[in-house]
Amino acid sequence: MIRETSPLAARRVLAERYVDSTVGDTWRRILADLHPKQRAFVLDRSSRKCALKGRRGGGSYGTAAWLLEDFHRFPGGMSLFLAHTKEAAKNILWATLEDLNERYGLGITFNGLELSATLPNGYRILLKGAKDRAQVEKLRGFSKGCRRIAIDEAGSFEAHDDLFRYLVRSVLVPQLMDQMKKGGGQLALIGSPGQSPAGYYFEVTSGVDHMGKPRRQWSTHHWTALDNPYVPAREFLTEELETGGHILDPDVAPAELDVAGDLSRPAGDVLAGVGIAAGREIDQVFSKGAHDRHS
């Protein structure tokens, strides 16, 4: 008896058996267009990793690329992108996915109602929020699990740290089990440092808790706007310094600009790194800290 197959199911079967070489070429183009630190993050095969980065460093672009990597090998699969709210998730990633689709001809179908981006082989990226227990519990219901999960704005969860730990450990990690044998099963936390040296995001990026006790540190990548060749970061910061802009205010710079998130350092030490009058490079507002903190 001949069994009828839907067009979508047929495409998934074909995708499992035959990998179009043009897809591989497209991915190599995407990878080549990333800046080196984005690329290192994407190619990191760790099952748990973090991107601790400053503003305008290209975090959303690197995250989108990571969620899309090798999508042709996961027909009908699904990856999840989370932020504190669904609206925030859309604001962070939606336009980036649209840009990638237009630039590289990925053939993505966008559903603005459910906030999903579906590739031609049925692989989907879903955008969700996790602002409270009710929303978190809804993230349990994926029958085939998740290939990859990315949580952006990870530092903003510090005010709800118990819920954040529950979200990651109890709700999301078990969802990765189904895809491990297929090469999936990875989780990434992305975002600027939190406002204080405490909480789950601080622990997994620093290797210590707020009391200085050792904790498991995830593979952690650092970058800032100065690493992003697509934004005029140096010119912007120079102008901010010369005009007394608030972006370099002691209450702003450590968390928003200092990639290390080393809030144990006095803010003045951070800002000294941009002292043009002292002949210092702007880079130092970002660069020092990660090595100091963990040495």
Image (cartoon, helix red, strand yellow):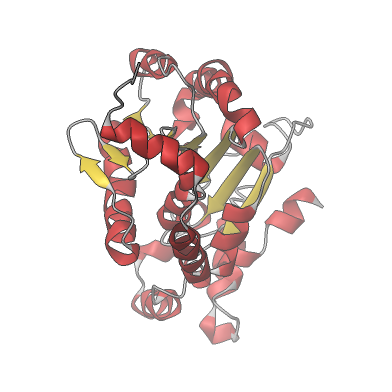
How many numbered marks are there?
0
Q: Judge whether residue 194 can be spotted in this image.
A: no
* Image quadrant in which you'd find residue 180: top right
Q: Residue at x 60, y 22 (%)?
A: 177
Q: Residue at x 48, y 56 (%)?
A: 62
Q: Nearer the viewer, residue 98 or 61?
A: 98
In the depicted structure, whether residue 112 falls above or below residue 259: above
Q: Nearer the viewer, residue 188 or 131?
A: 188
Q: Quadrant of the N terminus?
A: top left
* Outermost residue, front side: 1
Q: Nearer the viewer, residue 276 or 8?
A: 8
* Image quadrant in which you'd find residue 111: top left
Q: Is residue 171 left or right of residue 185?
A: left
In the depicted structure, whether residue 289 falls above or below residue 168: below
Expressed as whole percent of the image width and height from the top left, the position of residue 61 reads 42, 57
In the depicted structure, whether residue 170 falls above or below residue 74: above
Q: Judge whether residue 93 can be spotted in this image.
A: yes
